Image: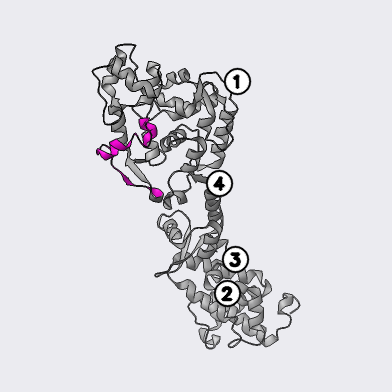
C-alpha cells in the first residue's frame, strides 16, 4: 500500500484487489466484456491479468493514461469502430453503480477526459484536435473541414461515420495549417496593394519575386492563389529601397500609366518588377499617401518603358499553380489598354463574352481578351509612339494614316503597326521565362 500513489491510499484492500483485476482484464483480454468470475479463464490468464493490473496501479495514474491513450490511438487509426467499444469499457471502470467503493472516484480523477464528450475522450493523451476545436482555431466551417479530409490535406482519423462525420486531427498539423492561412492572403490583396492585374502576381510568383502559399490545405479548400505576406513585404521593401532621391523628372509619370505603351498581350510585369527591385529601372516615389497602390506612386520616365516593348512573359511548362483562365473586367481593360467605358462595345458586339465573377462581378475568358488584344491597338499604346496625347490620337491617325479605320474598339493592330513601321524601325517581340 505504501508504495502506491497517494490517490490510492484510501482504497480498501478489497477494492484494490478488484480494481487490479478489472484493469488487467481491460488489456490482457481485449475481447472480454469484463463480466463474470475471472477465474474461469484459468490460472495462466489470471496471472497475466493480475500482473498487468498491478503494473498499472504501481505507476498510477501515468501508466494507465499512457496505456489507454496508446490503445485508443491504435483503435481509432484502424477506423473499424473498436474504439467505441474500448471507450465503453474504460468508462465502466469509473461507473460508481457497478464498481467497488472508491474506485470510480480515483479512476475519474486519473482520466477526467474519458468521461467528457466522446470526441474529447477518444483523444486522451493524444496531441490532437476535434472538429469543433479545429474550426475555432482556423475559422473554417464543417463543410470546409470536409474538403480538407476529401483532399487528404490534413492527417485525420474518423471517429464517427454517417451524415455528420466525427474526426480528430493532428494538433501540430492543424496549427501549421492555421499559421499558413493566417500568414498568407488571396492574391487580390497583393493586386490592390501593388496596383497589379492578377496575371502580374502569377508572373511574380513564377519569377520568384513572390511566394505562394503551398500548404495542401489551401488547394483543398479551393482558396486560389495565396501569397505569403512576408514575401509581399520583402518585394515592396526591395523596390522602395531603390527609389531615386530628389525631384522627379518633369516628364515622369506613374508606372501603371506608363506601361500602357505595351499592348497586344499581357504585360511583362514580372520583369518590370524585378528590374525595379534590382535598381535597373529608375523611378521616383510620388507623395500620394501610403494608401495609393505602389505602381501608382512609382514615377518613371516614359522612355524607360521602351526596354519592355519587346519582352513577353512565357509561363513555365510546369507551373506551381493553375493559371487563371478568366480575367476580371479591370484586368481585361489593363491588357487592352482601355477603360470600362471603351471596352463596352467589345462586349456588346460579342467579341468578349461575360461570365459570372466573384461578388456579383463579371469576368471575361482570358483567351478572348488575348485574341482581341492581338487584333486591336488602343490610343494609350499609340500615343507615346507618335508623340501626342491620347485624346489626340484619333486626329493623328486621320491625318497620317488615312486608310486606317477604327475597329469596334481601338484600331486594327496590324494596320496601325504597318503604318508606324513605315515611319520608323519595327519592334520585334522577345520572350522571357
**Lower position in the chain sequence, tag 2 or tag 1:** 2
Q: Are marks 3 and 4 in contact (CB under 8 Å)?
A: no
CA–CA distance in space, label 2 to label 4: 34 Å
Give the image quarter of residue 382.
top left
Q: Is residue 386 above or below residue 243?
A: above
Q: Is residue 194 above or below residue 221?
A: above
The quadrant of the image that shows the C terminus is: top left
Secondary element under disc 2, as helix, strand or loop, is loop
Of 105 and 129, which appears nearest the observer? 129
Q: Which residue is mark 2?
A: 116
Q: Give the class, few, some or many, for how many residues have Cα within 10 Å of label 2's Cα (few <14, many ≥20).
A: few
Magenta residues span 332-358
Q: Find residue 183 and name its label.
A: 4
Q: Are marks 2 and 3 in contact (CB under 8 Å)?
A: no
CA–CA distance in space, label 2 to label 1: 70 Å
CA–CA distance in space, label 3 to label 4: 30 Å
**Lower position in the chain sequence, tag 3 or tag 4:** 3
Q: Which residue is mark 1?
A: 247
**Lower position in the chain sequence, tag 3 or tag 1:** 3
CA–CA distance in space, label 2 to label 3: 14 Å
Q: Give the class, few, some or many, for how many residues have Cα within 10 Å of label 3's Cα (few <14, many ≥20).
A: some
Q: Are marks 2 and 4 in contact (CB under 8 Å)?
A: no
Magenta span contains residue 260: no
Amino acid at each position: 500500500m505504501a508504495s502506491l500513489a497517494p490517490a490510492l491510499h484510501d482504497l480498501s484492500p478489497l477494492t484494490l484487489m478488484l480494481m487490479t483485476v478489472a484493469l488487467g482484464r481491460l488489456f490482457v483480454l481485449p475481447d472480454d466484456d469484463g463480466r463474470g468470475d475471472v477465474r474461469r479463464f484459468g490460472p495462466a490468464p489470471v496471472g497475466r491479468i493480475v500482473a498487468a493490473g498491478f503494473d498499472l496501479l504501481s505507476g498510477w495514474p501515468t501508466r494507465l493514461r499512457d496505456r489507454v491513450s496508446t490503445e485508443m490511438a491504435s483503435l481509432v487509426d484502424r477506423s473499424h469502430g473498436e474504439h467505441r467499444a474500448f471507450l465503453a469499457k474504460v468508462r465502466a471502470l469509473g461507473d460508481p453503480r457497478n464498481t467497488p467503493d472508491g474506485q470510480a472516484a480515483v479512476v475519474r480523477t486519473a482520466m477526467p477526459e474519458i468521461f467528457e464528450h466522446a470526441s474529447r475522450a477518444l483523444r486522451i493523451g493524444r496531441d490532437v484536435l476535434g472538429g469543433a476545436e479545429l474550426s475555432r482555431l482556423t475559422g473554417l466551417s464543417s463543410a470546409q473541414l470536409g474538403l480538407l479530409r476529401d483532399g487528404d490535406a490534413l492527417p485525420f482519423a474518423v471517429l464517427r461515420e454517417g451524415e455528420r462525420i466525427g474526426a480528430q486531427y493532428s494538433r501540430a498539423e492543424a496549427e501549421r495549417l492555421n499559421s499558413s492561412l493566417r500568414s498568407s492572403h488571396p492574391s487580390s490583396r497583393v493586386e490592390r496593394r501593388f496596383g497589379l492585374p492578377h496575371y502580374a502576381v502569377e508572373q511574380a510568383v513564377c519569377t520568384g519575386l513572390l511566394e505562394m502559399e503551398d500548404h495542401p490545405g489551401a488547394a483543398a479548400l479551393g482558396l486560389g492563389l495565396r501569397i505569403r505576406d512576408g514575401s509581399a513585404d520583402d518585394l515592396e521593401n526591395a523596390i522602395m529601397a531603390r527609389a531615386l532621391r530628389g525631384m522627379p523628372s518633369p516628364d515622369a509619370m506613374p508606372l501603371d500609366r506608363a506601361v500602357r505603351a505595351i499592348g497586344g498581350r499581357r504585360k511583362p510585369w514580372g520583369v518590370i518588377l524585378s528590374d525595379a527591385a534590382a535598381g535597373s529601372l529608375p523611378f521616383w516615389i510620388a507623395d500620394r499617401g501610403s494608401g495609393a497602390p505602389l505602381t501608382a506612386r512609382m514615377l518613371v520616365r516614359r522612355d524607360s518603358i521602351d526596354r519592355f516593348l519587346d519582352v513577353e512573359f512565357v509561363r513555365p511548362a510546369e507551373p506551381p499553380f493553375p493559371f487563371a483562365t478568366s480575367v476580371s473586367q479591370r484586368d481585361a481593360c489593363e491588357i487592352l489598354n482601355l477603360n470600362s467605358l471603351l471596352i463596352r462595345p467589345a462586349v456588346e458586339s460579342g467579341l468578349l463574352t461575360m461570365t459570372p465573377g466573384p461578388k456579383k462581378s463579371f469576368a471575361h475568358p482570358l483567351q478572348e481578351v488575348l485574341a482581341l488584344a492581338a487584333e486591336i491597338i488602343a490610343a494609350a499604346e499609340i500615343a507615346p509612339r507618335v508623340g501626342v496625347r491620347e485624346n489626340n490620337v484619333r486626329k493623328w491617325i486621320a491625318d497620317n494614316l488615312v486608310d486606317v479605320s477604327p475597329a469596334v474598339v481601338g484600331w486594327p493592330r496590324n494596320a496601325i503597326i504597318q503604318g508606324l513601321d513605315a515611319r520608323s524601325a519595327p519592334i520585334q517581340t522577345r520572350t522571357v521565362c
